[in-house]
Image: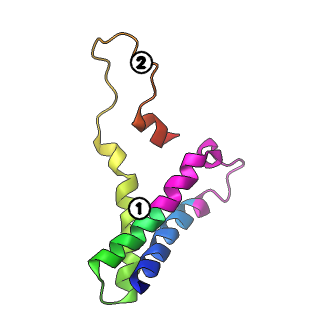
Amino acid sequence: MDWFWAGSMGALLHEASRWAGLRRAARLPLYMRRLHYWLFTVVFIALGGLLAYLLEPQTVPQALCIGLAAPSILSRLERIFPERMELGVQGTADKPTLRDWLRG
């Protein structure tokens, strides 16, 4: 279970690097005030730890790197999906999608 905590620390470092980039911003971004951002942050940290636990690294730095890479890769998966396209169905443009929810 120690690999889980080391991987979680790596994932937390990933999130902390995002927060450090905002330290000079005049105002925090709107998404940081939304509950789903914080829920996904906790989920990504847990996934970093879980992945480190499942991959059974040999050293603590390896576990940290696995934990650091996991949320980084998962948060970029949204970019591989194509933009939303209107295919002629009336009335669906106003309905929020999962992608909209993930964006905030």
Task: Count how many numbered circles sit on residues in the image.
Answer: 2
Observer-nearest of 8 and 31: 8
Which span is picked out in magenta? 19-43
Q: Which image quarter is the N terminus in?
A: bottom left
* Mark 1 surroundings: few (<14), some (14-19) or many (≥20) residues within 10 A: many
Q: Give the percent coordinates (x, y) of residue 24.
A: 68, 57
Q: Which residue is mark 2?
A: 93
Q: Quadrant of residue 84?
A: top left
Q: Is 69 drawn above or below residue 36 in the view shown? A: below
**Left or right of residue 25, residue 45 in this image:** left
Q: Which mark is residue 71?
A: 1
Report, in whole angstroms, how far the alpha carbon at label 1 lies from the one at label 2.
30 Å
In the picture, measured across the screen, residue 57 lies left or right of residue 67, that is left
Seen at 67% across and 49% down, the residue is 28
- As for residue 67 lying within the magenta part, the answer is no
Residue 14, compared with residue 32, is above or below; it is: below
Query: What residue is rendered at 29% in x and 11% in y?
Result: 88
Helix, strand or loop for disc 1:
helix
Q: Residue at x 62, y 56 (%)?
A: 22
Q: The residue under label 1 is which amino acid type? A: Pro
Is 81 drawn above or below residue 3 in the view shown?
A: above
The secondary element bearing badge 2 is classed as loop
Give residue 103's mark: none
Residue 25 is inside the magenta segment: yes
